Image (tube, rainbow, N blue to C red):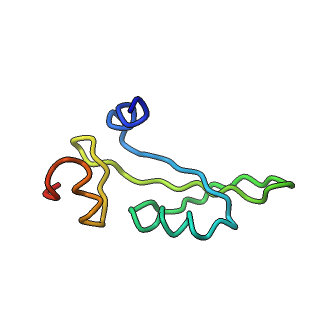
Amino acid sequence: MAVLDRARSSERLWAAVWDWNTASRRVLAKVGFTETERKEVDAVHGTTLFTTIRLSPIGGVAYRDPCLRDLRGDGGQG
């Protein structure tokens, strides 16, 4: 919960994912994250991609999926 409370006070939320992890990349894209230009190459594990999503002015994530929006506790109205 502390992570969520901290995220609510931010304008953006960031997530990192390995470039080869297509399933996680799809999940991040589905909930509204977009890949940025930032990448970090690791010789052992591959390239880390950085994704971001803009948070709404009231501190909630601007999800595109109405089912996920309901998890914010706004009845899917946010």
- Which residue is found at the position 70% from the left and 67% from the top? 20
Question: Which part of the image, by quadrant, shows the C terminus?
Answer: bottom left
- Which residue is found at the position 43% from the left and 34% from the top? 3
Q: Position of residue 9 (x, y in %)?
A: 33, 33
Left or right of 36? Residue 73 is left
Q: Position of residue 17 (x, y in %)?
A: 62, 56
Q: Which image quarter: residue 69?
A: bottom left
Q: Which image quarter: residue 68?
A: bottom left
Question: Which part of the image, by quadrant, shows the N terminus?
Answer: top left
- Which residue is found at the position 77% from the left and 55% from the top? 41
User: 57 or 62: nearer the eye?
Assistant: 62
User: 64 or 40: nearer the eye?
Assistant: 64
Number of on-image labels: 0
Q: Which image quarter: residue 22?
A: bottom right
User: 37 or 6: nearer the eye?
Assistant: 6
Q: Position of residue 28 (x, y in %)?
A: 48, 61
Left or right of 66? Residue 54 is right
- Which residue is found at the position 26% from the left and 52% from the top? 71
Q: Position of residue 62 (x, y in %)?
A: 29, 55
